[in-house]
Amino acid sequence: MNYETPLEAEAEDARAPEEDAVTATDDGVPRRKLIFLAIFAGVVLLVVAFLIHSGRDSGLSEEDGSSLPVVSVLAPGMTSVTGQINATGSLAARREMPVGVVGDGGRVVSVPVEPGQWVRRGQVLAVIDRSVQSQQIASAAAQVAAAKADADLAQSNLDRALKLVDRGFISKADVDRLTATRDAAVARVGVARAQLGELRARAARLDILTPEAGLLLTRNVEPGQVVSGGPTVLFSVAKAGEMELLARLSEEDLARIRVGQTAQVIPVGSDKSFTGQIWQVSPVIDDQTRQGTARIALSYAPELRPGGFASATIQGGTVVAPLLPESAIQNDEQGSFVFVVGKDNKVARRAVKTGLVTEQGIVITDGLNGKERVVYRAGAFLSAGEKIKPKLVKPAAE
């Protein structure tokens, strides 16, 4: 049998409260859980401190006991930039000449040309039946011959009368009458000839001819078709084969180009570039699209098809101005602006005007002289008057 002595029982009773104190707090929460929570909170604080320290390495530093953001800035200087304007538009004949029936019309008997052919000035494009006109011309020619015969007879009678008037056989009045008869016969010859000429001219107009040499673009008539005079276009010809690009440009871009500037045109479906020259700038702006047209003259090439789509790069003049990356330029309802760092390292808002957009950056046409320190990227996170620690970087153009 196991019997506990009184001293052993008292010692056991003394240890029990101490073990309960280790395993539980006064409110019943285990001490081990509290120790775990304390360790977790310490880890969180270390992580937060690390993140804050990392953030200060990238954008914050201690200066005179206060935290200042480290911000990249640049002094853009002055850069020489060759202006380029990109545009798109449709191709067309520079001088497209519509050709139709100028006469009375009729049935088309032949069309000896096809689109894509080169035609010379005055070449026959289509022939209209003239069987009726041929008979009219023959009749008019016969009338001319009859009138001429009458005029010859009247002239002979007058000649004989003039020989007899000196002998007294013919009076002066008879001579005057014969002279009038001769003059009337000669006039009838003139009328008959004029009528014959009119019929021949009408018949000649039955041939549809090219007004100028060039490239035949379209043919809208076939043999057997009945045509009549009027606005109907049967053929279209590009004078001398010259083409053009109708480049659509914004108001701002339109104001920057001039007649005579060169442009490189690339039609859709071709990787070949064609050199053209601006020969006309639209004097009006479309009030709906706010765009105008620059007409770029192009020499003939098989790849340049009227109605096709093409892109153009217009070469402008050289501009010397500050060049900034897009990240340095901010925009709001007041317009474009940048943040400039002053001598006290405080940022100030500076309104600017932008110009050409190039691969190297955006040209600043007004607002900077190139010597300022301009905030490079963090402008969206700064406010005017804020003090920073500037870190100078190289200009975007370098």
Image (spheres, grey):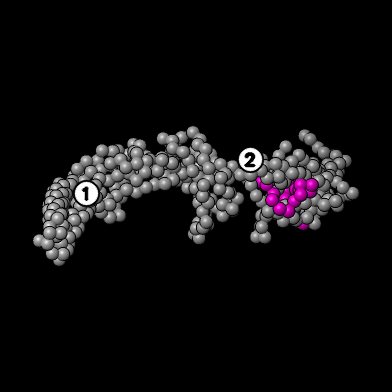
Q: Amino acid at mark 1?
A: Arg
Q: What crowding class fits label 1: few (fewer than 14 Cα within 10 Å), some (14-19), or many (20 or more)?
A: some
Tell me, yes or no, whether the highlighted magenta stretch contains residue 374.
yes
- Which one is in front in this view, the residue at disc 1 or the one at disc 2? 1
Q: Residue 24's spot in the image, x, y percent?
A: 78, 47
The residue sitting at 34% across, 41% down in the picture is: 121
Q: Which mark is residue 19?
A: none
For the residue labelled by badge 1, is the local secondary structure a helix, a strand or a loop?
A: helix
**Between 240 and 163, the one nearer to me in the picture:** 163
Q: Residue 339's spot in the image, x, y percent?
A: 75, 52
Looking at the image, is mark 1 or mark 2 earlier in the sequence? 1
Read off the magenta span: 362-384
The residue sitting at 22% across, 41% down in the picture is: 110
Q: Quadrant of residue 3?
A: top right
Left/right of residue 64 with respect to residue 101 in the rendered view: right
Q: Which mark is residue 359?
A: 2
Tell me, yes or no, whether the highlighted magenta stretch contains residue 196.
no
Q: Residue 307's spot in the image, x, y percent?
A: 40, 44
Disc 1 to disc 2, C-alpha distance: 67 Å
Q: Residue furthest left?
A: 169
Residue 16 appears in the rendering? no
Q: Amino acid at mark 2?
A: Glu
The residue sitting at 14% across, 55% down in the picture is: 163
For the residue labelled by badge 2, is the local secondary structure a helix, a strand or a loop?
A: loop
Q: Which residue is mark 1?
A: 200
